[in-house]
């Protein structure tokens, strides 16, 4: 999904690995990717990559990297670490060796013995996998799922990045009706509205690298102006979000307002048993209760049966269900057209996709 988003942003050449995508671009990509990427976790600058099997190698090769090109004399640079399948497995030691090596590298450039670390934040990540060290600077700060609109929390909210991925994996677009009958605090409808309006999800927040001396303020200004210019006008017909829980609906309304899409979504308290629509060719995208995370009384099968029966009344609609419930196809008595394994936090889920017929082409009569 992130690869598709990067291509749309104008960065088609990238290398996809497990859990990360690498590409080469200028500083404007730091601003544009932070502002626009909807399903990525964070944007990192790779400072260096090398093999290391002992602390001496880690120290020497880290020290040889061009840290002073990025870090000013007063930079705050906490070092986070992780290590998998490597000889250097003690993460606290790796973090402290990396920090010492960077301090030594900075002493070449700045005429001081100690660094005050009172300035802007430059979070550094040392990641070691199979004895290969990757050193990165985190340009994002708090993860990209923290859009800035979700200030209230419901019982089992979906991460904004996952909600955006669900919408982007569907056939939803601004011309099609949208419904989430288990919307909770509104994450899926809000992400869908942001997508339909082409609103950059990062416009409501700031990023660690906005203060970095290496990136001119003009770069951020231009990326923000571009994002404002590309925003589409409010939707003609609002997306629909419903939930049994009145308190969640109230929170969803607050979140939509904070996200700037309150006129684009109609939230309503409603049992899924009342689900209906007079419109055709819509997309129903939802994250119903799983029966494990929300500690309901367990049996969610009747709820899924109700959903399935209501959807039978909407034969032109496409339905997308993210859940850890295993036998959705047998509950729905229908084979899905596509399914994907996705993780909602630590819970292994399946994204069941049931496609309706293609919408009829709109005919323009003169
Ligand atoms: C997994 S949560 C959805 C969380 C949501 N995606 C969010 O980001 O906040 C499932 C939701 O289903 C709602 N729910 C449970 N039973 C329902 C029913 N019979 N009709 C409609 N909603 C129901 C719960 O109130 C809860 O908000």
Image (cartoon, helix red, strand yellow):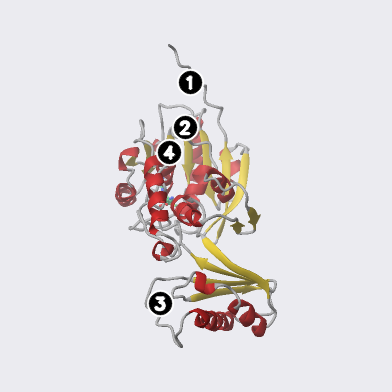
Asked if labels 3 and 2 touch by Cβ distance under 8 angstroms, the answer is: no
Query: Which picture quadrant has residue 154?
Result: bottom left
The mark nearer the N terminus, 2 or 3, is 3
Residue 243, horizontal then vertical, whole percent: 37, 45
Kindly identify the residue that appears in the image at 46 percent across and 84 percent down: 111
Q: Which of label 1 and label 3 is nearer to you?
A: 3
Where residue 282 is drawn, which disc sits there? Answer: 2
Asked if labels 1 and 2 touch by Cβ distance under 8 angstroms, the answer is: no
Q: Which residue is mark 4?
A: 196
The mark nearer the N terminus, 2 or 1, is 2
Kindly identify the residue that appears in the image at 62 percent across and 41 percent down: 338
Q: Which residue is mark 1?
A: 362
Res. 72 visible in picture: yes
For marks 2 and 1, give the CA distance: 15 Å
Nearer to us in this view, 291 or 346 = 346
User: Dot 2 lies on which element?
Assistant: loop
Examine the rendered structure and indicate whether residue 262 appears above or below residue 109: above
Query: Which picture quadrant has residue 50?
Result: bottom right
Q: Which residue is mark 3?
A: 74
Q: Which of label 2 and label 3 is nearer to you?
A: 3
Residue 236, horizontal then vertical, whole percent: 35, 30
The mark nearer the N terminus, 4 or 3, is 3
Kindly identify the residue that appears in the image at 41 percent across and 59 percent down: 216
The mark nearer the N terminus, 1 or 3, is 3
The mark nearer the N terminus, 2 or 4, is 4
Crowding around mark 1 (Cα neighbors within 10 Å: few <14, some 14 to 19, many 20+) is: few
């Amino acid at each position: 999904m992130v690869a598709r988003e990067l291509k749309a942003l104008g960065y088609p050449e990238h290398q996809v690995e497990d859990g990360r995508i690498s590409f080469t671009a200028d500083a404007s990509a730091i601003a544009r990717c932070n502002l626009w990427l909807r399903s990525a976790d964070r944007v990192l600058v790779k400072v260096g990559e090398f093999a290391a099997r002992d602390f001496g190698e880690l120290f020497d090769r880290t020290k040889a990297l061009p840290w002073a090109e990025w870090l000013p004399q007063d930079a705050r640079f906490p070092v986070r670490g992780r290590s998998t399948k490597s000889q250097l497995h003690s993460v606290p030691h790796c973090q402290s060796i990396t920090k010492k090596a960077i301090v030594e590298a900075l002493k070449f450039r700045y005429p001081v013995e100690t660094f005050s670390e009172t300035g802007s934040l430059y979070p550094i990540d040392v990641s070691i996998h199979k004895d290969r060290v990757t050193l990165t600077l985190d340009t994002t700060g708090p993860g990209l799922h923290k859009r800035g609109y979700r200030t209230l929390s419901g019982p089992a909210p979906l991460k904004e990045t996952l909600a955006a991925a669900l919408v982007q994996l569907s056939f939803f677009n601004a011309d099609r009706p949208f419904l989430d009958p288990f919307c909770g605090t509104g994450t899926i409808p809000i992400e869908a509205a942001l997508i339909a309006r082409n609103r950059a999800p990062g416009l409501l927040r700031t990023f660690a690298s906005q203060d970095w001396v290496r990136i001119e303020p003009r770069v951020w200004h231009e990326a923000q102006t571009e994002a404002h210019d590309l925003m589409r006008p409010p939707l003609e017909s609002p997306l629909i979000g419903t939930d049994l829980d009145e308190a969640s609906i109230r929170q969803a309304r607050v979140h939509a307002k904070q996200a700037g899409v309150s006129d684009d979504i109609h939230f309503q308290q409603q049992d899924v048993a009342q689900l209906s629509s007079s419109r055709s060719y819509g997309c129903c995208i939802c994250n119903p209760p799983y029966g494990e995370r929300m500690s309901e009384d367990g049996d969610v099968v009747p709820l899924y049966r109700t959903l399935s029966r209501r959807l039978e009344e909407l034969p032109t609609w496409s339905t997308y269900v993210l859940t850890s419930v295993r036998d959705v196809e047998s509950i729905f008595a229908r084979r899905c057209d596509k399914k994907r394994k996705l993780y909602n936090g630590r819970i292994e889920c399946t994204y069941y996709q049931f496609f309706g017929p293609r919408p009829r082409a709109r005919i323009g009569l003169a």
